[in-house]
Image (cartoon, coloured by chain):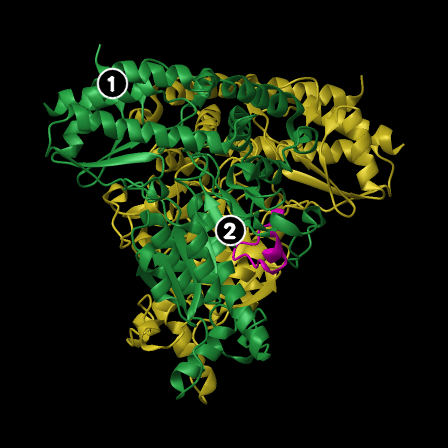
Chain colours: A green, B yellow
Amino acid sequence: MSDLDTKARELDSADELAPLRDRFVLDETVYLDGNSLGALPANVPDRLADVIRRQWGELRIRSWEESGWWTAPERIGDRIAPLVGAAPGQIVVGDSTSVNVFKALVAAVRMARADDGDRTGDGVRAGDDVGTGEGVRAGDDVGTDEGVRAGEGAGGTRGRDEILVDATTFPTDGYIARSAARMTGCTLRPVAPAEVPGALSARTAAVLLNHVDYRTGRLHDLPSLTAAVHAAGAYAVWDLCHSAGALPVGVDEHGVDLAVGCTYKYLNGGPGSPAYLYVRRELQDRFDSPLPGWTSHAEPFGMRPDFEPAPGALRGRVGTPDILSMLALEAALEVWDGVPVEAVRAKSLALTDFFLECVGAYVPDGRLTSLTPVSHEERGSQVALRCADAGEVMKRLIERGVVGDFRHPDVLRFGFTPLYVGFADVERAARVLAEVLG
Amino acid sequence: MSDLDTKARELDSADELAPLRDRFVLDETVYLDGNSLGALPANVPDRLADVIRRQWGELRIRSWEESGWWTAPERIGDRIAPLVGAAPGQIVVGDSTSVNVFKALVAAVRMARADDGDRTGDGVRAGDDVGTGEGVRAGDDVGTDEGVRAGEGAGGTRGRDEILVDATTFPTDGYIARSAARMTGCTLRPVAPAEVPGALSARTAAVLLNHVDYRTGRLHDLPSLTAAVHAAGAYAVWDLCHSAGALPVGVDEHGVDLAVGCTYKYLNGGPGSPAYLYVRRELQDRFDSPLPGWTSHAEPFGMRPDFEPAPGALRGRVGTPDILSMLALEAALEVWDGVPVEAVRAKSLALTDFFLECVGAYVPDGRLTSLTPVSHEERGSQVALRCADAGEVMKRLIERGVVGDFRHPDVLRFGFTPLYVGFADVERAARVLAEVLG
């Protein structure tokens, strides 16, 4: 038995979170892809069977009320809230991450412009449809009209017409940000997160950032970047897909304006489970969604032709909630009962440290380059290793029972979910990786 | 035994679709709310158990490929296609109806403007982001810029700056249409469907219509309204929520441009199951989605910063597909194997005819007014009855095992799903209704 093997056993023995593994359905595989699709929580199958057979099959339509279907988006949002450091009443679950990025960014631009309108007192930007009745084809928000005129005239104030987006983002955020920019008459400017402070200006309306980089696992400095965005009078939208459930986020504490995230990675909600949207309490009255569906109406069953947004986070809802997926997620979130995120973070860092240690010991020099920051302050819960022929290497790892994933063109990505990954798993993964490379 | 009771038995005996009831989980309840939430197909529970325990629990991430998760949106779209008269390759499943209305309407406006650009040869409207780099804050599409200038100048052509929406629509379509109008610089004009032909003009970019009215059950004339919209150079977007699965739609045959629908009513996909989007084949290359997510990219795993839309209907996809709900829907659609929509339509009309006959016979004159058209050409698969104290009446019906629903302020709504509702159910529902009213 190697030293590292012994160390792994010791670390596992001392791991207070180790028993949580029993809350999941797992086998002999070393599953290091929970940052792509979390493992199945053991309570989900029976819960879903009940939802399908009894709630849908027997109660049918009555379940919207009697089984709490109607309120699921906000109820499950409140279950996610403590995991990202949010007080209740600020998160709704529903739609995909992409759709929520669109809601959040457009709403952020509208708030930024409304602020400027408030400051200058011109009020011209506030209304919907203003100008359109007068033969002016305005774009989104009346600011467009003003912006065009200003652009045509000399010396006019440009207002807030720029969205900054993390240049290293998972692509969907960039695609959606481009659409949000196009539809609000903004330009989109990709900027590396570290360079955001220098790129902010009086033109910046909103900034879309990833908390943890999907490829490298780098953790960005959410508190200081949010503060910088605010100092420029802009709004910060954070994508928490790769941080929620792996480390403390502190959205309330750090003044995050809007945030989105998926629930199928570290939250284990199941394939394509619904995403969530956080709208800071102070901003909820001003959250003006580009997707105002009937379930975000103040009186959804009034069937009224005019839209009046529901109070609070509920205005982040859109259409009929997707109940099967949503209630699978609700069950999945119960694995967090009594689990402090801080303990998860401590174990996560210990796991990634130990993986890097084992890889260093087992893999010959020069075969791998770690893209993952050494500093804990800059590390999420994954390790990304650059490697020649990475696609083939990952295939062989998977054949030998170590599951990570491959990110084009040359990255091996290993995610460490502290709820169910142990130190012996980590040692084995590094050992098999060395064998595959050797 | 009354004459109508005898007639019901005869009709049931002659009903070739009667055996389909065994494909559902049902009890003694007369369930006339399948136009809100379809009953549970009997094969769904075991299918979902397999999806959860084996595909997610054992195969985990491998299921995206091995279990066909990745291609589910288009595969299930192709299952819906014959039910609405579409050839394969034109429907994708995903998101909510509301979100799909947004995609379809914005894309329709863009196509209408591109047509005008093509006709005048100015090309100015075609590009994304044009002008924004030059300090012009354009709204959606560059047409905005031109539109504003035209509005400011004298005698300029206004272009297509109007969206017509069914004034009697289920509210969410109206709310979303208002947002689409706002974000594309259009005005939104609510018009009763019958008045659409007279309201069309060279300003009309897109028209959003319901095939069947959610409240009255009135069936609108899709072929002639679509033709009228086309004659005006505009695009027709149809909401099929209350028709798909109840009657033939013929989207291909009648030249529908874009269509959306939910799957939890007559398609029995389960509570809040994913909606679908139809994009006519000839328009797919021009379908320019306002929600371009990573799964609608031509090379989704290339992780490229620039968006290049996938070919075909796939560009209607957005984020990661919601697998649990989607595969429940896939199982649910198997109940349609070997079932011609024409036979379903014939039975649907027989059911609603018989219900009206029984209500006429059992309920004293003056207690109810039918909002449902007498003519078959104008009738969907539901009967709406106006009634004093309708909310209370529906409560008592439900207590007595007849489930319909109540629509504010005074409508009793009864949906007839030919796959599992029989003529004896209909007779009993009318009899209990008469008792409650008596």
Within 10 angstroms of label 2, few (less than 14), some, or many (20 or more) residues?
Answer: some
Q: Chain of mark 2?
A: A
Q: Which mark is residue A4?
A: 1
Q: Is residue B97 left or right of residue A308?
A: left
Q: Nearer the viewer, residue B61 or A339?
A: A339
Please name the amino acid that badge 1 sits on: Leu
Q: Which residues are magenta?
A: A281-296
User: Compared to B145, does B99 lie above or below?
Assistant: above
Residue sitting at 45 percent across and 67 percent down? A232
Q: Chain of mark 1?
A: A
Please name the amino acid that badge 2 sits on: His
- Give the distance between the C-alpha atoms of the residues marked 1 and 2, in whole angstroms: 39 Å
Q: How many marks?
A: 2
| Residue B311 on image: x %, y % | 27, 48
Res A391 → quadrant: top left
Q: Residue furthest right?
A: B438
Residue beneath disc 2: A254
Res B416 → quadrant: top right
Of badges 1 and 2, nearer the viewer stands 1
Q: Residue A291 magenta-drawn?
A: yes
Within 10 angstroms of label 1, few (less than 14), some, or many (20 or more) residues?
Answer: some
Q: Nearer the viewer, residue A370 or B72?
A: A370
Residue sitting at 61 percent across and 38 percent down? B381
Q: Is residue A157 left or right of residue A89?
A: left
The image quadrant where one finds the C terminus of chain A is top left
User: Compared to B318, does B268 lie above or below?
Assistant: above
Q: Residue furthest top?
A: A1
- Mark 2 or mark 1, which is nearer the start of the sequence? 1
Q: Residue A273 magenta-drawn?
A: no
User: Compared to B4, does A314 lie above or below?
Assistant: below
Residue sitting at 53 percent across and 33 percent down? A326
